Amino acid sequence: MRPYSQSFTLILGWLWLFLGAVALHAQEVDSPPAMEVSAELAQKYPLKSHHAKLSFGCLDCHTNQGSNLANLKRLKDDDCLSCHQSRDKMASRLAFMELKKASPHNSIHDGKRLHCDECHMEHRPSVNMCSECHEREVPLWMGETP
């Protein structure tokens, strides 16, 4: 190997490391700022255990709403579906329940039209809307609403 090709390889290696470090730093700069949530707010707005295990912060769901906690708005279905993909995907996860006509994500009454927050609540206990009419049957059909 010629002496200049070793130097050239070394320079390329250092350049590659430098550009990689710049790219990593740029990703950190573009990500939303971490928000410090007081113990009082964490108690007032608790996360569901499955979201807490993923270390979700306020801005993971409340995207494009600024960083002032007081100004965060109620989520819409599209916010939930940005992670949970689609109504069809959610219905397919519970397709086995359609045999009893009991799938909450593709119900005999509403199809796939229900809004997520008609049953699922992030910061307070969820409710199973089916229980409003099917109080006795729901415990036989399904478990607790996440």
Image (tube, rainbow, N blue to C red):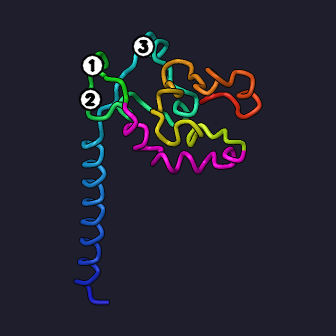
Q: Secondary structure at mark 1?
A: helix
Give whichever of discs 1 and 3 has the lower sequence position.
3
Whole-angstrom CA distance, mark 1 to mark 3, is 14 Å
Q: Amino acid at mark 3?
A: Leu
Residue 78 in the figure: left or right of residue 84: left
Q: Quadrant of residue 5?
A: bottom left
Asked whether the residues under the numbered discs 2 and 1 touch, taking CB atoms below 8 Å apart as contact, a structural biologist would say: yes
Whole-angstrom CA distance, mark 2 to mark 3, is 17 Å
Q: Residues within 10 Å of mark 3 (few under 14, many from 20)?
A: few
Per the rendered image, the range of residues in magenta is 76-99
Residue labelled with disc 1: 71
Q: Secondary structure at mark 3?
A: helix
Residue projecting furthest to the right? 140
Quarter of the image that includes the C terminus? top right
Q: Residue at x 56, y 46 (%)?
A: 91
Residue 42 pos. (x, y %): 46, 16
Quarter of the image that includes the N terminus? bottom left
Mark seen at residue 6: none
Residue labelled with disc 3: 41
Residue 117 pos. (x, y %): 47, 28
Asked whether the residues under the numbered discs 2 and 3 touch, taking CB atoms below 8 Å apart as contact, a structural biologist would say: no
Residue labelled with disc 2: 65
Comparing 81 with 65, the one in front is 81
Residue 1 in the figure: left or right of residue 146: left
